[in-house]
Structures are given as structure tokens and as C-alpha cells.
Amino acid sequence: GQEPGSRWRFVCGGRPAKAQMGSTSSAPREGSAPAQVPVFYTDDFFQKYGATAPPREPRQAPAQVSANQAEEVTGFKTKTMERAHILAELREEELQSAEASAKRLGNWASELRARAVPCMAEQEEVERCYAAPPGGDQLRCGQVVEAYVRCSKS
């Protein structure tokens, strides 16, 4: 029987072994395989009985390639080279086109940055008026807004 409060870890040889912290058993476990024992062979043994690779079948001479097959292979290689050449030309054209577009867009962006913003002074005046309206009333910014509208229409 078991004593109250005791714990059992495994069964060795048909009887339970009491588990204690840090304890190990030197008894063989049931169902465990025995340890592998290294086996040493002499060079003579390997020369007599050993083989590094399975025996090979004797090689046959390569079959004769017909003239028609040779033409097909040559034609395929030629077509492949032509395709590669055409693709290279297309890539070069696309690259040149992309570079021209990038240059054109860069010039356009530079021109836009160089332009003066129209009615900038009037716009700033409207922003100042709405941020701090005279007398606290934004309706008194009407004259400033009208000046901005006149500038933008001219």
C-alpha cells in the first residue's frame, strides 16, 4: 500500500520506487534499448568486405544525335538568344523613356517651386484677421477678405 503524503515516480522491476528530490535510479528501465557499443574495424576488413558506393551498371556509349535533332537544338538556342536580345532592347527603351519622364517632371516641379504665390500678402492678412479679429468679431474682417478676393480675380 501507499503511505499518505508519499509520491511515486516509476516502477522498477515490478515495485514502485519512491521519488525524492534529486534522486536518480541506476536500475535499467523497462523497454529501454541497451546502450550502443562502438564497433571498430581494421583497414584489412574494409578492403576485403567494405565498399564505399554500390556497384554501378556499365555505361553505354551515347546514342548518335540525328541531324534533325541537332537542327532543333540549334534553332531553339537561336530563338532563345533572339528573345533575350529583343527583351534587352525593350528594357533599354523603357529605361530611356522613364528617365526622360523623370527629367520632365523634375523640371516642372522646379518651375512650380520658383513661382511666387499670388496674393500672399492678402492671404496672410486674412489669416491674421481671423486669428485675432478686431473687437473679437470676425465679421469685421470683411474688408480684408474683399481685398483678397479682388487680388485673386486679377
Image (spheres, rainbow, N blue to C red):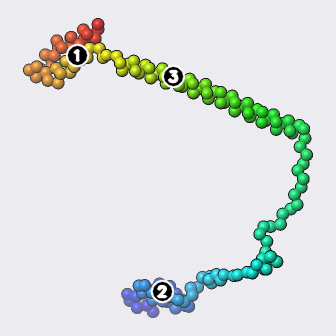
On the question of residue 7 being in view, the answer is no
* Labels 1, 2: front one: 1
* Above or below: residue 57 compared with residue 141: below
User: Which residue occupies 69% across, 30% down?
Assistant: 85
Q: Locate the N terminus by quadrant.
A: bottom left
Q: Is residue 113 left or right of residue 18?
A: left
In this figure, which residue is indicated by the disc labeled 3?
101
Q: Which amino acid type is marked by label 3? A: Ser
> Residue 115 placed where, x, y %?
34, 16
Identify which residue, 74 or 12, lies in the foreground: 74
**Residue at disc 1, secondary structure:** helix
In this figure, which residue is indicated by the disc labeled 1?
121
Q: Residues within 10 Å of mark 2 (few under 14, many from 20)?
A: few
User: Which residue occupies 73% across, 33% down?
Assistant: 81
Q: Is residue 135 left or right of residue 151?
A: left
**Residue at disc 3, secondary structure:** helix
* Labels 3, 2: front one: 3
Mark with earlier residue (1, 2): 2
Mark with earlier residue (3, 1): 3
Identify which residue, 129 or 16, lies in the foreground: 129
In this figure, which residue is indicated by the disc labeled 2?
24
Instruction: Specify the quadrant of the image occupied by residue 88.
Output: top right
Q: Is residue 55 left or right of residue 99?
A: right
> Residue 87 placed where, x, y %?
66, 30
